[in-house]
Image (cartoon, rainbow, N blue to C red):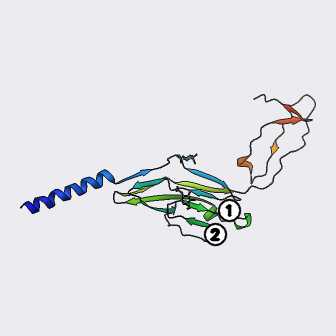
Amino acid sequence: MWILAFIFFQSILNVFSEDLHSSLYFVNASLQEVVFASTTGTSVPCPAGGAPPASLRWYLATGEEIYDVPGIRHVHPNGTLQIFNFLPSSFSKLIHDNTYYCTAENPSGKIRSQDVHIKAVSREPYTVRVADQKAMRGSVAVFKCIIPASVEAYVTVVSWEKDTVSLSSAV
Ligand SMILES: *[C@@H]1O[C@H](CO)[C@@H](O)[C@H](O)[C@H]1NC(C)=O
Ligand SMILES: *[C@@H]1O[C@H](CO)[C@@H](O)[C@H](O)[C@H]1NC(C)=O
């Protein structure tokens, strides 16, 4: 009887201590997009973790567990997903512009991070230009700053100049 009672309390204690000392948590809920330069590559820590240390795995948003591609993509034992720098000619949408998530699993259970869009941009030289416009004297002419499509999303027009004199914005 005493032995049974002892085992019973022991198991309550075990469950109790597991609840107290085992947890899973999200690390960085604001990590939803990582934009990196193809020349530098990127390292993304798993945005989920746990105590005792959780086993961390990365997946594509489609649910496929990702595999190491030597010299291209690697998941470190600490759960950091590394995407190596690459030449623009080696761009692979599946690896360099895709949505990933990470899971953390330990005795408490398992959690899934939010989706993280990881996107490479190539830092290539670019030029912007303005096309000539014709307008009747006294009417309005509209000039558009023409930015190459490959960099358009990352380029902001900061000023217009006429004969090297900056024009102030009337917006
Ligand atoms: C969380 O993610 C954001 C967006 O990537 C980053 O700027 C910030 O440094 C991260 N914070 C921590 C604590 O890792
Ligand atoms: C994980 O390990 C890699 C390689 O050792 C290291 O570069 C990275 O900083 C580590 N990340 C964290 C979050 O500890």
Going by the numbered disc 1, the residue's amino acid type is Asn
As drawn, which residue projects farthest toward the bottom?
Answer: 70
Going by the numbered disc 2, the residue's amino acid type is Gly
Query: Where in the figure is residue 169, as x and y percent of width and height?
Result: 79, 30
Q: Which mark is residue 98?
A: none
Dot 2 lies on which element?
loop
Query: Where in the figure is residue 54, as x and y percent of width and height?
Result: 41, 59
Quadrant in which residue 72 is drawn: bottom right
Query: Where in the figure is residue 140, as x and y percent of width and height?
Result: 86, 32
* Left or right side of 158 for 36: left
Crowdedness near tag 1: few (<14), some (14–19) or many (≥20) residues, C-alpha within 10 Å: some
170 shown above or below 155 = above
> What residue is shown with label 2?
71
* Left or right side of 25 for 171: right
Residue 160 versus residue 29: which sits nearer the camera?
29
Tell me which residue sits at (25%, 53%) in the image. Answer: 16
> What residue is shown with label 1?
85
Tell me which residue sits at (78%, 56%) in the image. Answer: 124
* Left or right side of 115 for 125: right
As drawn, which residue projects farthest toward the left?
Answer: 1
Q: Quadrant of the C terminus?
A: top right
Crowdedness near tag 2: few (<14), some (14–19) or many (≥20) residues, C-alpha within 10 Å: few
- Return the disc, 1 or 2, that comes first in the chain's sequence: 2
Tell me which residue sits at (71%, 47%) in the image. Answer: 154
